[in-house]
Image (cartoon, rainbow, N blue to C red):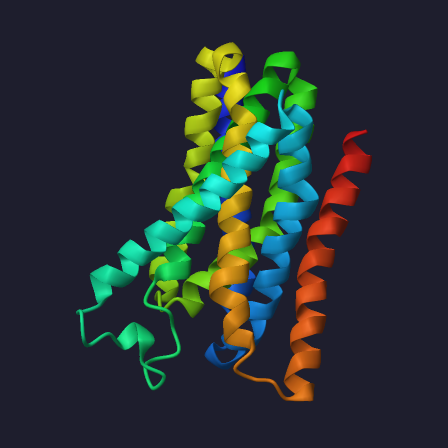
């Protein structure tokens, strides 16, 4: 196989396999579990952003300030985007998005934002896979396997957020699968334009992290405060910690394996 064929195969397999493995768990969960497992999704998002994406962005950037500014701009941009989605669902004086008796889901806001951020993340993963295969085939295969292992717990969180946002299970799977094809786009573009794209990688990573932080902090965590009782708080805290720990564990294992 040529280098380009390896990149295409690894990108397709990496995206589809991680989504399929995550779907086996997330889409088989009972509907009653979804609000509780949102806590796990929060931990997975924050863990991926702060333990994996941001360190990678800062390490690869020529300027720490530029990465920080990209994160800040990304958070502001996702705030504006969410406002536009809210406006689409609202009338000036009658908006069920602000009705305390409205449905539990958030009218697709979190789902839309996480899909955009996940697409950035998958695009960057494709660039990393291409760079590894262009170095040598063995390194490319190991890198692709590491990315698949890293993506699975995060994709579980993404599925849970889409379900929490009111998407059907079929639509959540199809949209997550569609987002995974950004890895193929990143891999193919990197094969042809890798040198000119290298300086943009930290910015893509920072935007992906910004989307995860915004969704977790602005959209999902406030919903947890609606259940202030001690038992709910303890279960939420444990699940958030498990979400963070799963990202840390996968990252730790894959880094030691690739080393």
105 is higher (above) or lower (below) than 51: below
Q: Is residue 121 visible?
A: no
Res 56 quadrant in image? top right
34 to 128, vertically: above or below: below
To which quarter of the image does residue 228 belong? bottom right
Name the residue located 66 percent from the left edge and 61 percent from the top edge.
243
* Residue at position x 74%, y 57% in the image: 245
At horizontal 50% and vertical 28% (from top left) the residue drawn is 9
- Residue 200 visible in image: yes
196, above or below 152, in the image: above
Q: Nearer the viewer, residue 78 or 115?
A: 78
Q: Is residue 116 left or right of residue 139?
A: left
Residue 145 rendering spot, x and y as whole percentages? 65, 36
> How many numbered circles does the render carry?
0
Residue at figure coordinates x 51%, y 14% from the top left? 194
Q: Quadrant of the C terminus?
A: top right
Tell me where residue 199 appears, x and y as whole percent. 54, 19
Asked if residue 105 is positioned above or below residue 183 in the image, the reply reads below
Give the image location of residue 192, x and y in percent: 45, 12
Give the image location of residue 127, x and y in percent: 53, 25
């Amino acid at each position: 196989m040529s280098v380009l064929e390896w990149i295409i195969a690894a990108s397709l397999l990496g995206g589809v396999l991680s989504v399929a493995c995550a779907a086996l768990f997330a889409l088989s969960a009972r509907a009653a579990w979804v609000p509780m497992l949102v806590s796990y999704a929060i931990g997975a998002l924050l863990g991926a952003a702060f333990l994996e994406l941001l360190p990678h962005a800062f390490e690869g950037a020529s300027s720490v300030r530029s990465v920080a500014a990209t994160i800040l701009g990304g958070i502001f941009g996702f705030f504006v985007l969410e406002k536009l989605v809210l406006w689409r669902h609202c009338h000036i004086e009658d908006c069920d998005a602000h009705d305390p008796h409205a449905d539990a889901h958030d009218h697709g806001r979190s789902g839309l934002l996480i899909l955009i951020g996940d697409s950035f993340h998958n695009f960057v993963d494709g660039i990393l896979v291409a760079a590894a295969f262009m170095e040598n085939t063995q390194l490319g295969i190991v890198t692709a396997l590491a990315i698949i292992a890293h993506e699975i717990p995060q994709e579980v969180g993404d599925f849970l957020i889409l379900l929490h946002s009111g998407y059907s299970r079929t639509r959540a799977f199809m949209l997550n699968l569609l987002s995974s094809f950004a890895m193929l786009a990143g891999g193919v573009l990197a094969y042809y334009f890798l040198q000119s794209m290298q300086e943009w990688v930290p910015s893509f990573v920072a935007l992906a992290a910004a989307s995860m932080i915004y969704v977790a902090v602005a959209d999902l965590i406030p919903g947890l405060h609606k259940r202030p009782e001690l038992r709910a708080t303890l279960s939420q805290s444990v699940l958030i910690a498990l979400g963070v720990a799963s990202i840390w564990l996968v990252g730790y294992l894959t880094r030691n394996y690739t080393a």
